Amino acid sequence: MIKMLETIPQTDPLAIPEQKAIIDQILEENRSLPGAAMVVLNELQSRIGYISVPMQAYVAQKLRVPMSQVSGVVSFYSFFTTTPRGKHTVKLCLGTACYVGGAPQLIQKAQELLGVKPGETTTDGSMTLEICRCIGACSQAPTVTVDDKNVHGRVRLNELPPILEKLRQ
């Protein structure tokens, strides 16, 4: 784990003084809480936007827990990400109702329009494309969620390009 921390990329939050200060503050404020790893990881995801592998090693070292525990939490919960996300996150639901309603075709179209696969971010950093399983809006299937705030329901193929174009502006 120490070796992993010796070769931190210059773009990693641990190598950027302002972001490292945030990481250290989160660790300091939460280290004595029961279940501190989960609390710290949630705060890091919220404030930094992602949890890189070097950040995971740093958290494990500072909390004195095995790296496997930290990486296990990050890999198990789908809301954690290990790479930076775009300015906007576009999630296409693949729950049963959305799947039957045409979500696979929407995903294909989104990939064509954005030039990325699910889990990837556009080269300009404007959007990250993600797949989710069910947002609880089955009567509105298929759904597209933008930034975990705006839910577009009953989306048809011709309605997807304007949704994505509005995000680019």
Image (spheres, rainbow, N blue to C red):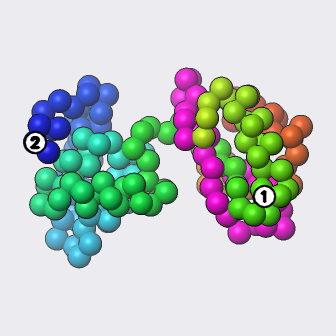
Q: Position of residue 99 (x, y in %)?
A: 77, 56
**Dot 1 amino acid type:** Cys
Residue at left offset 21%, top offset 31%: 8
Query: Label 1 belongs to which residue?
Result: 98
Query: Label 2 belongs to which residue?
Result: 2
Residue at left offset 84%, top offset 68%: 139
Drawn side of residue 98 relative to residue 49, left or right: right
Residue 117 to residue 72: above or below: above
Picture disc at residue 35: none
Identity of the residue furthest to the bottom in this view: 34
Q: Position of residue 63 (x, y in %)?
A: 16, 60
Distance from Cα at disc 2 to Cα at disc 1: 45 Å
Whether residue 52 is visible here, answered yes or no, is: yes
Residue 24 to residue 124: above or below: below
Earlier residue among tags 2 and 1: 2
**Magenta part of the chain:** 119-145
Q: Position of residue 89 (x, y in %)?
A: 60, 44
| On-image quarter of the C terminus | top right
Residue at left offset 21%, top offset 63%: 29
126 is within the stretch colored magenta: yes
